Image: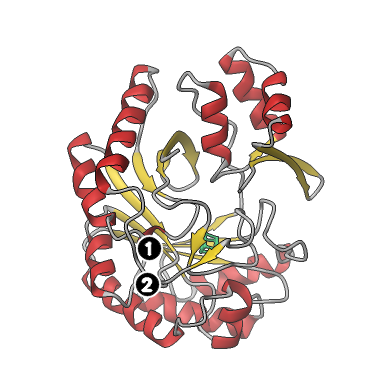
Amino acid sequence: MIAFGPVPSRRLGRSLGVNNIPPKICTYSCVYCQLGRTIKMQVERQSFYGPEQVAREVREKVAQARAAGETIDYLTFVPDGEPTLDLDLGSEIALLRPLGVKIAVITNGSLVWHSDVRDALAQADWVSLKVDAVRDEVWRKVDRPHGSLKLDAIMDGLLEFAGNYGGELVTETMLVAGVNDEDALLSQVADFVSQLRPAVVYLSVPTRPPAEEWVRPPDEGTIVRAHQIFSRRAARVEYLIGYEGNEFAFTGHVEEDLLSITAVHPMREEAVSEFLARAGADWSVIHELIAQGQLVETEYDGRKFYVRKLR
Ligand code: SF4
């Protein structure tokens, strides 16, 4: 499913997701990835679904959501992998423009040293760039990049993109306990991030089941310290540690909506309950999807989550 939602986004209001990458192809295999370990590590850009199919499926989803009275604040490229691997990203953005909804891309920034990736991203209204580390050994430990990637080139590309971008640029730094949360490391990341002049620096922690079981969020003291370190260098620093709430969209197809949302966004038990209640369905839908091997129930931090099974 290429289009899903709209789902509540901590940063973008009601966001209709665009999943332009098959699961799970990425340039990184981050230890905290909520989609699990990367199935296919790749750095070569390629065409996946093609711009026409992506645009058609998004148009259909927008029409369904609008018919159901759902608000859509953003169309957000937030796939099951790295969105800039898609050679057609720029064409897709252009085809979606007539819908009259702002367009966002959430990228790990690892391919931004390609000028054509910078050109594609430049067409979006809002871009989020990941900066988890600026020291090579820490970057390799937290993001586990494809072997051919070079951190220096990526950082140069990020600076070049940020220097020319006319939309709203934000950064996101994921803090993982014992990996990138020391003060000295945070200061280095904050120094670099401040050069990108982001509208907002987001600090996040793993709040959903991570790829590696040992991954833990830093303690509250460290999270507060991180905020202080970044705030000395950037105007606006916000946590991304809250849960989005339970206002998941219902566009009329219970199973399809649940599977498309949970492919990118694991749902907490109480969110599923509310979703089912609003859809006039019950837990038998979930049990059936689990029995079919399409949905998985998992626990993290004492809470139950439901997530799409990756093939
Ligand atoms: S968190 Fe994003 S960049 Fe990291 S492995 Fe998952 S999809 Fe790729």
Is residue 248 in view from this perspective?
A: no
Q: Quadrant of residue 298?
A: top right
Sequence order check: which comes first, mark 1 or mark 2? 1
Q: Residue at horizontal 39%, vertical 80%?
A: 154
The location of residue 266, given as percent across then percent down, is 62, 43
Which element is circle 2 on? loop
Q: Report whether 70 appears left or right of 51.
A: right
The numbered disc on residue 62 is: none
Is residue 141 in view from this perspective?
A: yes
Q: Which residue is mark 2?
A: 111
Q: Which residue is mark 1?
A: 85
Total label count?
2
Gap in Å between the C-alphas at discs 1 and 2?
8 Å
Which element is circle 1 on? helix
How crowded pointer 1 is (Cα within 10 Å; few <14, some 14-19, many 20+) is rated as: many
Q: Between 190 and 23, which is closer to the camera in this rendering? A: 23
Q: Quadrant of residue 309?
A: top right
At label 2, the amino acid type is: Leu
**Residue that sits furthest to the top in the current view:** 280
The location of residue 47, given as percent across then percent down, is 32, 57
The location of residue 88, given as percent across then percent down, is 27, 55
Q: Residue at horizontal 26%, vertical 47%?
A: 51
Q: Residue at horizontal 63%, vertical 17%?
A: 277
Q: Are marks 1 and 2 in contact (CB under 8 Å)?
A: yes
Q: Is mark 2 within 8 Å of ligand 1?
A: no
